Image (tube, rainbow, N blue to C red):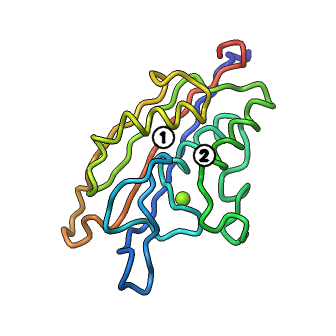
């Protein structure tokens, strides 16, 4: 029996580096499509938006589609520095073509600094806009790293997301 629901899991992480003075320069810090003031940012081929990438993979996973790395390879110059909204928009479109729409998203972002809390409403609203759902259906939780080696602190952003999808009728 087809219950009409699918759950998908997404995960992503990016190394963080200063914007200047390093061999590996960090890009601007963008989380869920929102630019945060920060002296460091992700080292990445695209814009390094770990949250957007995790949500994209959750949606793709729920719909049984190929993952973000397969659909948008980081060897493809088209995606260099690109705003990751394009990935999530495409994931939603492909899932929709199979009859799946997002019911809700729950995500956790693990980041030492900058603090996520003040930006959560804006991030939720932006993801909800891209997903085409009400903002109550997108939840974001912020955590800090609890690494064994404190010198590693702040050198990574990590995001986990789950997506519940339903047959379009559940909209
Ligand atoms: Mg990524």
- Secondary element at tag 2: helix
Q: Residue at x 37, y 54 (%)?
A: 36
The C terminus, quarter of image: top right
Residue on which disc 1 sits: 161
**Quadrant in which ligand 1 is drawn:** bottom right
Q: Tell me if 109 is positioned left or right of 118 in this view.
A: right
Residue 6 vs 116, above or below: the answer is above
Q: CA distance from mark 1 to mark 2?
A: 8 Å
When asked about the image quadrant of residue 60, the answer is: top right
Q: Residue at x 52, y 21 (%)?
A: 134
Q: Earlier in the sequence, mark 1 or mark 2?
A: 2
Q: Are discs 1 and 2 less than 8 Å apart at CB?
A: yes
The image position of residue 91, as x and y in percent, is 69, 42
Rendered image: mark on residue 57: 2
The N terminus, quarter of image: top right
Rendered image: mark on residue 48: none
The image position of residue 6, as x and y in percent, is 63, 27
The image position of residue 98, as x and y in percent, is 80, 30
Q: Tell me if 159 is positioned left or right of 39 in this view.
A: right
- In front of the other: 3 or 157: 157
The image position of residue 148, as x and y in percent, is 21, 64
- Secondary element at tag 1: strand
Question: Mark 1 packing: few (<14 Cα in 10 Å), some, or many (20+)?
Answer: many
Q: Residue at x 43, y 49 (%)?
A: 159
């Amino acid at each position: 029996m087809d219950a009409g629901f699918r759950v998908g899991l997404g995960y992503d992480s990016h190394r963080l580096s200063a914007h200047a003075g390093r061999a590996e320069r960090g890009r601007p810090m963008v989380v869920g499509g929102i630019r945060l003031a920060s002296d460091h940012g992700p080292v990445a081929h695209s814009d390094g938006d770990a949250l957007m990438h995790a949500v994209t993979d959750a949606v793709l996973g729920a719909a049984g589609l190929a993952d973000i790395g397969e659909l948008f390879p980081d060897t493809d110059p088209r995606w260099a520095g690109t705003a990751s909204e394009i990935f999530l928009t495409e994931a939603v479109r492909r899932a929709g073509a199979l009859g799946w729409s997002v019911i809700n998203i729950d995500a956790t972002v693990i980041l030492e600094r900058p603090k996520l809390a003040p930006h959560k409403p804006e991030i939720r609203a932006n993801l909800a806009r891209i997903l085409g759902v009400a903002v109550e259906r997108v939840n974001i939780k912020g955590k800090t790293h609890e690494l064994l080696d404190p010198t590693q602190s702040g050198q990574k952003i990590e995001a986990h997301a789950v997506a519940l999808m339903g047959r379009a009728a559940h909209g």
